[in-house]
Image (cartoon, rainbow, N blue to C red):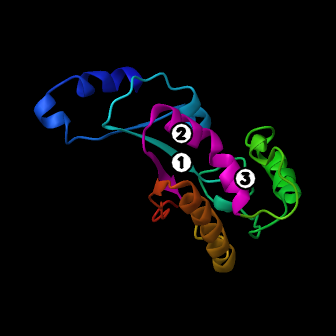
Amino acid sequence: MEQDSKPYRKGDKKNSARTKIVIGGIFNSSIYGLTLLDIDWDENIVLTFHCYNPLVFTHQGAGWVDRLDKSYRTKFPATAEKLLADSRKYFGEDFISDFDGITGMIDSGFFVKMFADAVKVAEKLELPLYCGEYGVIDRADPESTLNWFRMINEAFEQLHIARAVWSYKEMD
């Protein structure tokens, strides 16, 4: 993507002043992927990432996630220890770094810590930061879903991160 965006950024100056280019990193626009970007500063770049963490909560019952038992259900918030154990059970070592240094009941601090590297990249490059996708599948119970949205949005507000929710509509 870095190489693909350069011609657009160096192209027609008359139109490029109005055109924003949203750039995310590898691994499904992960925050880690943002830390690997090697891009030249351009006032029209907006950095993006996706957040569906913890995946065992946001994707519970999802038909397209092969490793997660379709009957698995969990509440939110939950303890970091429970979510870590469940994540390990279904995803092995993938996604466990989300819980590094987190203990006890999850709160908005979980997301603030998770977003820290993305914020550092955006601040270093002096670029806006945008969470282009985040959300919870409709199989999660409504109270837990509301809790998750409240907590993640507290973090977005605290860190001044723009965002767009993904509804999972017609995913199954």
Q: Please name the residue that numbered disc 1 is placed on.
A: 50
Q: Amino acid at mark 1?
A: His
Q: Please name the residue that numbered disc 3 is placed on.
A: 68
Could you tell me which residue is drawn at 49 percent across and 59 percent down?
A: 171
Mark 2 or mark 1, whichever is nearer to me: 1
What segment carries the magenta color?
Answer: 108-134
Precedes in sequence: disc 1 or disc 3 = 1
Q: Secondary structure at mark 1?
A: strand
The span from disc 2 to disc 1 (Cα, nearest Å) is 7 Å
> Does residue 70 appear to the left or right of 29 in the view shown?
right
Q: Please name the residue that numbered disc 2 is placed on.
A: 28
100, above or below 74, in the image: above
The span from disc 1 to disc 3 (Cα, nearest Å) is 20 Å
Q: Are marks 2 and 1 in contact (CB under 8 Å)?
A: yes
Q: Secondary structure at mark 2?
A: helix
13, above or below 163, in the image: above
Mark 3 or mark 2, whichever is nearer to me: 2
Precedes in sequence: disc 2 or disc 1 = 2
